[in-house]
Image (cartoon, coloured by chain):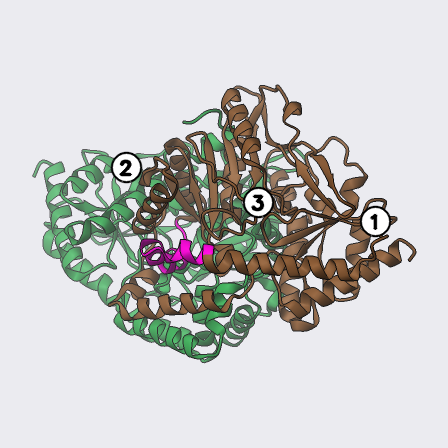
Chain colours: A green, B brown
Amino acid sequence: MPHHLSSLGEKLTARSGILELMDDLGNALQAGPSVRMLGGGNPARIPAVEAEWRRRMDALLKDGDRFERMLAHYDTSQGQKAFIRALVQTLRETFGWEITERNIAITNGSQNAFFYLFALLAGRDSGGRDRQILLPLVPEYIGYADQALAPQAFLGMPPAIDYIGNHHFKYCVQLDALPQDTSLAALCLSRPTNPSGNVVTDPEIRALASFAGDQGVPLIVDSAYGAPFPNILFVETTPYWDRNVILSLSLSKLGLPGTRTGILIADEPWIEAIVSMNAVVSLANGNLGQTLVRPMLEDGTLLRMSREVIQPFYLEKSRQAQAWIQEFFPDDLPYRVHLSEGALFLWMWFPGLPIPSAELYRRLKQRDVLVISGHYFFYGLPEPDAHSRECIRITYSQSDEMVREGLRIIAEEVMRAFGG
Amino acid sequence: MPHHLSSLGEKLTARSGILELMDDLGNALQAGPSVRMLGGGNPARIPAVEAEWRRRMDALLKDGDRFERMLAHYDTSQGQKAFIRALVQTLRETFGWEITERNIAITNGSQNAFFYLFALLAGRDSGGRDRQILLPLVPEYIGYADQALAPQAFLGMPPAIDYIGNHHFKYCVQLDALPQDTSLAALCLSRPTNPSGNVVTDPEIRALASFAGDQGVPLIVDSAYGAPFPNILFVETTPYWDRNVILSLSLSKLGLPGTRTGILIADEPWIEAIVSMNAVVSLANGNLGQTLVRPMLEDGTLLRMSREVIQPFYLEKSRQAQAWIQEFFPDDLPYRVHLSEGALFLWMWFPGLPIPSAELYRRLKQRDVLVISGHYFFYGLPEPDAHSRECIRITYSQSDEMVREGLRIIAEEVMRAFGG
């Protein structure tokens, strides 16, 4: 490293899992179709959805100087007033949430929003107490792991495991093991869960909300893949929000990751804090995502498209990928797939895998198949167990050919690892 | 504030100057033309420049699925390879700098880049030493003031003042007062200077670069308004870069603030550090700015437009605004304008002003004229002197009518403050 870095600088530039992932993603894009990119969370390119973006851009260019104004003006640090108004309207009508324009802030992507939230909450408070973010269900999103500026910022809880048949499983929150600890800063979970594709159930989310309320700390829910958009959910659940919930949405998984648009919905003091941080850290947000999507909120296209195009598209992709797994993995191989309840991933567990998942990742990479080693998603735990070295995350959102061929090679390498 | 915040959270959400500015900017946009917004750094809307953005967007839409790919793909954490390649080529050809693609990283705006740099550098290092950012010429950009996470992160140096005639002045770096201090983290300055429109001279920048080299710390130069684009420079100077300089550029003042595109040019280890932080804090950058501008780097339009359209436009605006100042401010009123050497601002100093500039700001705001009180730009100083309460920053980039009327009202209020 160059010269003298601050301790914080050293922490933030340590080689992180998310950096390895972003490197893989960038290099795979460069390499072209010879690499099977089953590692990143890049959404699929869905023709009907892309046609909609193009239509909206054409309309924008024809609407006086609206295109020029989009480029020429700094957004406010809260976000575009008209976009926020349209979103409030949509959420009130769809879910009956009692929110106003003062309950929403925009950020440069939801990764950015979580950086803000963890900086705000975790670490030493003014009373000298070190506060932690409780992750009630680990494995949890790789991108949080290195975001907190405070040391030991996360307190993770391993899940209970429901074994389902020979080749499936589902994680459950160990509600009876929630810590009676007064030094929590917040609870945080992704729903659907990245990486496992689990969806924390309605009773679980209500119990967590109630626990957070009792502790006097917020419950942060990352709905980047969930309701109301992009709605990549394959089980019936109810979106949950109350004044103690900080809900995070994103335009990325709709197909707009290049616009970097994140959305937080929370009680007013939280929104004010986020707006302050936006001003200091970034001045303002990018305008493109908000500008394209606002009319689609106003005329109902966005929710309809999520329900009628995006959700069925991914459901079919997930079923297809699972069928290939059944085809390529021999029945007597020790493998289990987490129930695919949402998000873009299949989470595979190989009980008793003789090599660590990081080694499986390397072997697959040599064969031009990129996945993510599961161990990155286990953090904040006292001592990681064997399970944390036996899983991989596989993205099924890319082309059928790529996913099929990737799964075939994964099956071969897992068999080889087991000495088959 | 809600619940328990971390100490860091409390710092980052304290009411900041930059937040007041962004609030003013947002509210002025909402209010429409009745408010004379001479406060923000919003670039002017220049028809020939806007026509170019529209042409490039039309071309993008017609070029196969390049528009769709822009939206659909996460950028790498370093930035778009093709954009970086084009920029390297441009800088090598124009200035002869020996840089490669490994010397450039993109961020979500240059505000964001400075947040990264200060987090990397300022504060306690692993040896337990508290390191500061030296600002060799204060007043300096308001947006840095609240960005550092470490306490007392900035060490500011007041300038020497050259009095020029009755109504002008220029700041100079007190080179002989540079601290022989071994706990510096970096030197940092904007060139042209925001807020004063000063341009640190070639001998000054060379002396600062040499001093930084001797101290073993980098020299950070913020060229958001400078060379090679947007080139809002009215004096002959030489852009400066060496391996010890971290140079920051931006697409904002070209007219693209809505795209949030910042650029850092530095030695490789710095770029690697910034790329790591990008992955952790934001995953990736917005794609729009890079996508629109890349072909304009490749065919030379960007530099030509900066030289032939943008620079002359602002030079004329600056001259016009100075003529109005001469018209509205009586010759016997104590006022001085900093030499307008670059950037979008006129920096006015009212020696002996009987009210603090913050009060002048409030009185002007009541008359629908928004400026920035100068006191926000004086920080990192042991004890601010009278000069720091006697200045305001006035943006001259808005419409002639708005600027003229604003200056007329400013003259009235200053006369009133002096009891005239």
Q: Nearer the viewer, residue B176 or B164?
A: B164
Q: Which residue in the structure is indicated by mark 3?
A: B192
Q: Amino acid at mark 2?
A: Arg
Whole-percent x, y for residue A336 in the image:
22, 49
Q: Is residue A10 above or below residue B249?
A: above
Q: Is residue A288 above or below residue A42?
A: below
Is residue A167 visible in the rendered image? The answer is yes
Callout 3: SS: loop
Q: Residues within 10 Å of mark 3 (few under 14, many from 20)?
A: many
In the picture, residue A312 is in which quadrant? bottom left
Q: Residue furthest left?
A: A420
Sequence-wise, which precedes: disc 1 or disc 3? Answer: 3
Magenta stretch bounds? B284-307
Does residue B329 appear left or right of residue A378 in this picture?
A: right
Q: Which mark is residue B334?
A: 1
Q: In whole angstroms, how far apart are the C-alphas of marks 1 and 2? A: 73 Å
Q: Which mark is residue A389?
A: 2
Q: Are marks 1 and 3 in contact (CB under 8 Å)?
A: no
Callout 1: SS: loop
Which is closer to the viewer, label 1 or label 2? 1
On the same chain, marks 1 and 2? The answer is no
Q: Amino acid at mark 3?
A: Pro
Whole-percent x, y for residue A48 in the image:
28, 74
